[in-house]
Image (cartoon, rainbow, N blue to C red):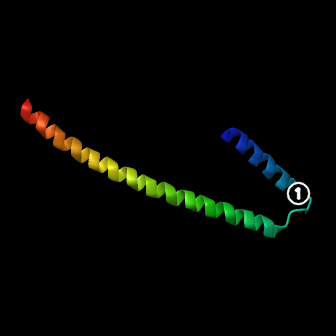
Amino acid sequence: MMDFLKRMMDWALEKEAEAAKGCHAKPEDIDKQIKMIEEKREALRKRFEEEDAQFSHILTKLHHIKAESLKCHTKEN
């Protein structure tokens, strides 16, 4: 599915490039598209950073739990 969407986007961008070469694309419209994509990219980046921070938090806790667990197993041996 993602491959299909990528091909459609590439096709649309090719048509947009052809329109620009033929002076049929308004720079203002392209600016709007650029702004929209930059905003979506920034939102995605922010979401990634938030989720990555959550994973880091969980991993830190798990490493601490493992360290505590190892203390018990070391005492038993």
- Residue at horizontal 13 percent and vertical 34 percent from the top: 73
Residue 12: horizontal and vertical position, in percent? 80, 50
Q: Secondary structure at mark 1?
A: helix
x and y, in percent, of residue 28 in the image = 79, 70
Q: Residue at x 16, y 38 (%)?
A: 70
Q: Compared to 9, does 33 lie above or below?
A: below
Task: Specify the amino acid type for callout 1.
Answer: Ala
Q: Is residue 12 above or below residue 70?
A: below
- Please name the residue that numbered disc 1 is placed on: 19
Q: Quadrant location of the N terminus?
A: top right
- Residue at 33% x, 53% y: name it: 57
Q: Is residue 28 above or below residue 50?
A: below
Q: Quadrant of residue 54?
A: bottom left
Judged from this view, the residue extending furthest toward the front is 1
Q: Is residue 75 left or right of residue 40?
A: left
Q: Is residue 6 left or right of residue 12?
A: left
